[in-house]
Amino acid sequence: MNVTPFKQAKRKHKSSARALSSARALIGAFVLAAAAFLLPMPQPAAANGTKVAFVGDQGVEQTARRVLELIRDEGTELLLIQGDLGYDENTAAQWIANIDDILGTDFPVLMVVGNHENFEWPAYLQWQKDKLARVSDIHCEGDVSVKAYCTYKDIGVVQVSPGIREVADIDGNDNYADYITDKFSEDTSSWRICSWHKNMRDMQTGDKNDSTGWGVYQSCLAQGGIVVNGHEHAYSRTHLMSSFENKTVIHTGSDMDIGPNSSFVVVSGLGGREIRPQLRGGDWFASIYTSTQKANDGALFCDFNNDKADCYMKDVAGLVPDAFTLTSLINVSADTDTVLVPETPEVPETPASSESSESSESSESSESSESSGTTATPETTAAPETPDENPSSGDTPANDGEPAVIDTNNQPEVDEPPS
């Protein structure tokens, strides 16, 4: 059969077109694979462990969304929110959308009421109840988000609301200290967490006054619980302590044994609102991260793995201002099958003094602090002698590509603001 030059050219054209199409397909597959490789991947929790994120004082601005994205990207399995959610009137729907869009509608979340839930509390509470109905791993009894005992795997959580007087139908002095003792005295979890919003003045670094009474702190401590609060827009952690009320430090190391009368307090309030300066300190603080230290928004993360936990505070710029390890003494021994449970203490609920500044917080400015996102980190120096004096900045220490760790240990006490 004779083939004309025209037909030969046509066949060559078709062959070239098929080759070009195949090449384009290969290039497209390579580009997609490369793009997938470049996307940020979640950081998995330790094998057989549970990664929990702790945050509070969020709002609905882009700063709050970035913290939620960090929580997602760190491979978090459970989120505990220590109050002050959307803040302002008509923000509940946006706050709920931020959580559900970024973390997913079935992501495990336990939140506790804060003073700024004076707007739309029924909407927030209904969202929490609906979520618990979908998440089978969380089991709660009591008035969820107000006065409840919840478990998630090997973690027991008591939620209480001491000092909350701004939200309708919530009693800020509802015998919470005894409730913590009662629930944890029956708890067999390896880890115990006490979650509430407000603070005592000495357990935060800003201008908050005594809101809760020492009873809840001491009851949680007696049961080997970790106290996690919000309210102050900063991050701080105490050393391992045997008395919160007396500020008695057991030791100042970063490896801590958690058990009866041996625990610490964390304020994790960098959820997205404006970041506040350091106005207070004390030798019982292990780490302080505020606007004085040029802080960015972020959250505390803990990988709970049997009786061990690795914890770190990480901000949205990738900086790690605090890291520590925990060993639980409240667990079931593999050898003896005995549960180490403290004796039930008699801890009175200390009356909380009035807070002159609390009534004005409902009208707090909604202006959010945009994180700078820079990789430069201030060199930690002595705390300022006056509240408006900031330490000088320095370069981020070289660490071979790992997140920068800021040394915030041994924070000196600063002058107290006027009452």
Image (cartoon, rainbow, N blue to C red):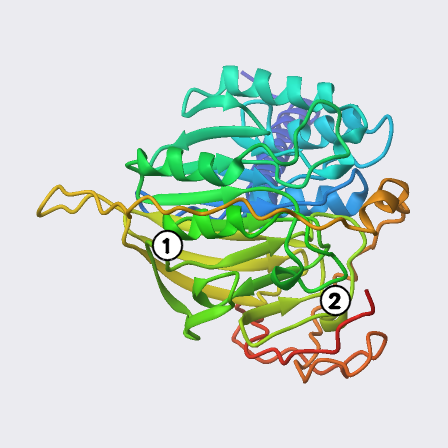
Amino acid type for the residue under numbered disc 2: Thr
Q: Total marks drawn? A: 2
Q: Quadrant of the C terminus?
A: bottom right
Name the spot of residue 50 as percent of width and height, x first: 39, 42
Examine the rendered structure and indicate whether residue 69 appears above or below residue 2.
below
Q: Residue at x 83, y 51 (%)?
A: 356
Label 1 Cα neighbours within 10 Å, binned few <14 / some 14-19 / many ≥20: many
Q: Residue at x 44, y 75 (%)?
A: 252
Whole-angstrom CA distance, mark 1 to mark 2, is 29 Å
Name the spot of residue 384 as percent of width and height, x first: 76, 81
Amino acid type for the residue under numbered disc 1: Ala
Examine the rendered structure and indicate whether residue 3 appears above or below residue 74.
above
Kindly tell me whether residue 39 is visible in this rendering. Answer: no
The quarter holding residue 64 reads: top right
Task: Give the labeled residue for mark 1.
Answer: 309
Name the spot of residue 396 as percent of width and height, x first: 65, 77
Task: Give the labeled residue for mark 2.
Answer: 374
> Element at badge 1?
strand
**Residue placed most toward the observer, 316 or 10:** 316
Left/right of residue 187 with respect to residue 122 in the rendered view? left
> Element at badge 2?
loop
Name the spot of residue 418 as percent of width and height, x first: 83, 69
Q: Residue at x 80, y 78 (%)?
A: 390
Label 2 Cα neighbours within 10 Å, binned few <14 / some 14-19 / many ≥20: few
Examine the rendered structure and indicate whether residue 114 appears above or below residue 354.
above
Dot 1 or dot 2: first in sequence order is 1
**Residue placed most toward the observer, 175 or 288:** 175
Q: Residue at x 81, y 42 (%)?
A: 61
Kindly tell me whether residue 409 is visible in this rendering. Answer: yes
